Amino acid sequence: MCGRYNIIDDPVIHVLLDILGVDLGPLPTRLNVAPTESVPVIHRHEGRNQLSEMRWWLVPHWSDGPSQKYAMFNARCENLEKSRAFKGPFSRRRAVIPASSFIEWQKQEGGKQPYLIQAEDQALAFAGLWDYWSDGTDHLLSCTIVTTEASEAFRPIHTRMPVILDQESLDIWLDEESSPEVLKPMFKPFAGSLIATPVDRRIGNSRFKEMPEPLGDSYEISQK
């Protein structure tokens, strides 16, 4: 799963935005982003990529409105075609959610240890889904992050991880005409190397909006 992530306004994140054709200037740094918060999302609109603010917790267009009854901030890739909530967005409303790093928790004796996960010298492009909900008065764009089984190298930290798209997959993922057969091969662990750093457990508090303090040495997780 992915329940926290960071967006840092630096040259690395702007390289990703440039590739997607949506670099509109400063992207406010957001630390320890938590589900239900507003996040920047790239999606296709009238044939072009567009950056919009969306609620990070999918609200299906057919629902009664925002609710936290079901955990809708992540979408398991195995369930996209089975779930009523995810089937429509997977078909026509896919998104890229930019991130600088994310937090994952490792189960340990005495509690869970959070790790800051990042790629070296590049931003992360999470595969996402989005939807539009309205009751005629209120209007809401919302999103979810697609997750997949973790690689063997990542499993000591967690059994799931976000689907992280490579540069060649970005346009295909966003293309509204892409078929499931073309998209499903993307549901694999990130092919490059990730850097994991154990960090202060205060990151578990969604009100903590600072970069977490490292508690030990970083190490490389090679997905190959």
Image (cartoon, helix red, strand yellow):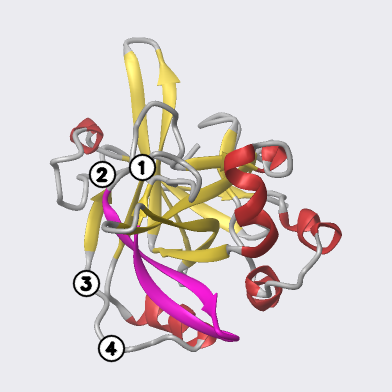
Tell me which residue sits at (43%, 46%) in the image: 59
Q: Amino acid at mark 1?
A: Gly
Q: Is residue 168 above or below residue 135?
A: below
Q: Foreground residue, 49 or 26?
A: 49
Disc 4 marks which residue?
25
Between discs 3 and 2, the one toward the N terminus? 3
| Lower sequence index among marks 1 and 4 | 4
Residue 61, compared with residue 96, is above or below; it is: above
The residue that disc 3 covers is 28
Q: Nearer the viewer, residue 158 or 98?
A: 98
What is the distance, in whole Å, between disc 2 and disc 4 at their CAs?
A: 30 Å
Of circles 1 and 4, which is in front? 1
Under circle 3, the secondary element is: loop
Q: Nearer the viewer, mark 2 or mark 1?
A: 1
Question: Do the CB atoms of the residues marked 1 and 3 lie less than 8 Å apart?
Answer: no
Classified by dominant secondary structure, the portion drawn in magenta counts as strand
Q: Give residue 169's position: percent from left, percent from top.
A: 69, 71
Q: Residues within 10 Å of mark 1 (few under 14, many from 20)?
A: some
Task: State which quadrant residue 115 falls in.
Answer: top left
Q: Of discs 2 and 4, which sits in the foreground?
A: 4
Between the residue at mark 1 and the residue at mark 4, the CA separation in whole angstroms equals 32 Å
Q: Which residues are magenta?
A: 37-54
Q: Tell how many labels.
A: 4
How far apart in space, not on screen, are marks 1 and 3 (Cα)?
A: 28 Å
Picture coordinates of residue 22, whole percent (x, y): 43, 86
Measured in 3D between alpha carbons, the distance from the residue under mark 3 to the one under mark 2, in whole angstroms, is 23 Å
Callout 3–callout 2 Cβ contact below 8 Å: no
Q: Considering the numbered disc 4 on the image, is that residue within a helix, a strand or a loop? A: loop
Q: Is residue 138 above or below residue 168?
A: above
- In the image, is residue 130 part of the stretch drawn in magenta? no
> What type is the residue that disc 4 sits on?
Gly
From the image, tell me which residue sits under label 1. 65
